[in-house]
Every structure is written in structure tokens, then in C-alpha cells.
Image (cartoon, grey):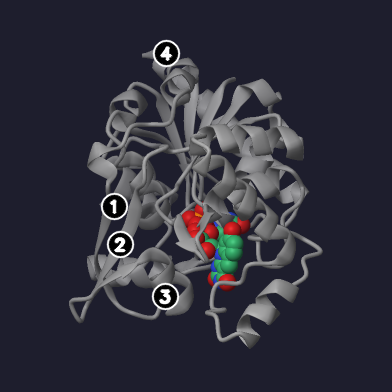
Amino acid sequence: MKIVALAGGVGGAKLAHGLSLALAPEDLTVIVNTGDDFEQFGLRISPDLDTVCYTLAGLANPRTGWGLKDETWQVLTQLKQLGAPDWFKLGDRDLATHLERTRLIREGMRLSQVTQRFCEHWGVKQQVFPMTDSEVSTELLTSDGTWLDFQEYFVKQACEPQIVDVHFKGASSALPAHGILDALEQADAVVICPSNPYLSILPILAIPGMYANLIPKKIIAVSPIINGQAVKGPLAKMIQDLTGSAADATFAAGFYRERFDLAGYLMDDQDSSLVSSVRAWGIICDTCDTMMPGEADRLRVANKVLSLAEACSARTENL
Ligand code: GDP
Ligand code: FO1
């Protein structure tokens, strides 16, 4: 079964890793959010792309989910001594990725080409694409009327401001990175990882052409909310702020079915009482333990997602 997965950073990378363990490398393509990308010290930082690639390569820091394992921080310490901003933690080994990406892009390479080259060096055999090679920046409007750049909100202000709107600057004139539309065309199913729908999946969907090519596919999503809480990050608070309702595990199903025909949905066992509400929307819904700290957990969730995808295909054949 050929799968295209849509992913943000830490949550998306965990399921992408599980799928990479369950599928042949040529059967998995991951499309990654780049709305979080920014420049720091003149370097091009693509946090979600690096998180997905490091995770697939087995190089990710297991404690944070982002950055590299066995990292050291000498450059950052020295920068701090010089009075430079140190709120965004760039490790010594991680800096090599940003230095080389910046050099290659300045030489004229596209971000997707750089990503492919890095994947070859890291031994990542799956196809990993940035959602676009154009510059797209997520910006958030706070309740006091200020627009914040993504990392200013997410890292510098620790997701504390109340958010009233989200905008993807540059998205309307961007194009999907070369190769994405072919991968979607060939896909048997599209998996939406348990990423933040507002901050990681909407920017991908905002790239012109992405929707039209997704819509004919069987789309299966995994809930990023377990028992009313996000596993990590601001999602539960954002749902409350943006919808006025408390977060629950049906949220992502409702969010996606407003935008396309969601065929399958996986929630956590802790939310099994909500399965009937999702099924009432005509969506095939199942549960399992969706916490994915380790490899075995990631494979378990990936296998459950693939079974859901098969059930969704079988349902169409029986119609
Ligand atoms: P970010 O870009 O680093 O914030 O990562 P994503 O957008 O890809 O994922 C963030 C979402 O992943 C959060 O809303 C978390 O609740 C969710 N998440 C993280 N780890 C897990 C997990 O192990 N299982 C599930 N179901 N969701 C997770
Ligand atoms: N997230 C943090 O919360 N604090 C950091 O200092 C931080 C540094 C960082 C460096 C490189 C990288 O690739 C990712 C990094 N992240 C950090 C994660 C990242 O900024 C966010 O989790 C995502 O952008 C949200 O998707």
C-alpha cells in the first residue's frame, strides 16, 4: 500500500517513523510543514523537516523529539556570552545541518533538493518533501492585536499568548514542491499524522494544488488529543481559544471533515466512549493506545492506521 503522510514536527515524526517501520521505503512519502521555518543568525532553520528526517534516521533527541541526540551546546554558550539571543536552542551538531542547508540554498539549490541530499547522507530511504520550496511563514494574531512570527510565539513566548487567528504568509502564491503531486497521484491513502491541525496541517493544505490532489484519496487521520489533552504543545489551549469549546479527541475528525471527506479516524483507547460520535459522521473509527514514545509503539499505531486504510478501501469496493 502506497502512503503519503502529512506531518508537522514531533507528533508527525513519531507516526512517520512507525510507518517507515511498517512499509517498504518506496511506499512511504512524507510531506512536511515548513510554515515554522525561519532565519536565526542568518541560517535557514527548517525545524519540522529536520525533526522528521532526524527521527526517520534514528538521530533525534529522544527527550525533546527535536534536535539531535548526543548534542553539545558550546556554540550557543559562547553566543550567550557575547550577548546574542539564545532562546532558540541550536546545538553544535544541529548547527552543521543549518550551515550546510544555508550554503546550498545560497548556491541555488531548492529546499526539497537539499532535503533529498541530506536524507541520502543520513540513510533515510523514504521520500521526504518540504510542503513547498517557496517561502511560507506561519503568523499568529494574539488577543492584544499583535501578529507574532511562529517561533516568537512557540518558543520565545512558550505558547503563552491567546491566539485569535492564524495566517500563512506567502501560501497563496506557493507551489507544492516538485514530486509531491506525483506522490499523491500514486498514493493508495493519505495519512494525517497526529500533528497540530492549526499549525502543522493547515499550512500544508494552504498550498494551492494540495487540496485538489488530496480530495480523491482515502484520507485517514490520527487524533493528537488524548483524553482532552495534547500530548505536548499548545493544541488544547488553541482549540479552547479558537472555538470556545474544550478540546476532545473528536476535534481533529470534525476539523478535517469540514474540509474534505475523512474516511478513517484513529483515537486513543482512553477516548473509546467518543467512537460512536465519530462513526455517526460516516467515518470508520477505531482506537488503540496511540502514545508513541518508542519504536514498538510507533509500529503498533502505524499498523492500526494501515488496517484502517484497508478497511476504508474495502468499504468503497463494497459500495
Ligand atoms: P510540532 O510541530 O513539533 O508541534 O509537532 P506536530 O504538529 O507534528 O505534533 C504536535 C501534536 O502531536 C500535539 O498536539 C500532540 O498532542 C501530538 N502528539 C505528540 N506525541 C504524540 C503521541 O505520541 N501520540 C498522539 N496521539 N499524539 C501525539
Ligand atoms: N523547540 C523548543 O521548544 N525550544 C527550542 O529551543 C527549540 C530549538 C530547536 C532547534 C532546532 C530544531 O530543529 C527545532 C527546535 N525546536 C525547539 C522545536 C521547534 O521549533 C518546534 O517544536 C516546532 O517548530 C513546532 O513544530
Q: For the residues carrying marks 4 and 2, which lies nearer the camera in this image?
A: 2
Relative horizontal placement of residue 26, taking residue 29 as reference (left or right): right
Label 1: which residue?
Answer: 168
Which mark, residue 318?
4
Q: Amino acid at mark 3?
A: Cys
Sequence-wise first label, 1 or 3: 3
Residue lying at the far left of the rendered structure: 145
Asked if labels 2 and 1 touch by Cβ distance under 8 angstroms, the answer is yes
What is the spatial separation of the Cα atoms under label 3 and label 2, in whole angstroms? 13 Å
- Helix, strand or loop at label 4? It is helix
Question: In front here: 219 or 263?
Answer: 219
Q: Earlier in the sequence, mark 3 or mark 4?
A: 3
Nearest the viewer among 154 and 211 is 154
CA separation in Å, label 4 and label 1: 40 Å
Query: Of the residues under marks 4 and 2, which one precedes in the sequence?
Result: 2
Disc 4 and disc 1 in contact, CB within 8 angstroms = no
Please name the residue that numbered disc 2 is placed on. 139
Q: x%, y% of residue 96?
A: 69, 55
Q: Is mark 4 within 8 Å of ligand 1?
A: no
Q: Position of residue 73 (x, y in %)?
A: 73, 73
Residue 250 can be seen, yes or no: no
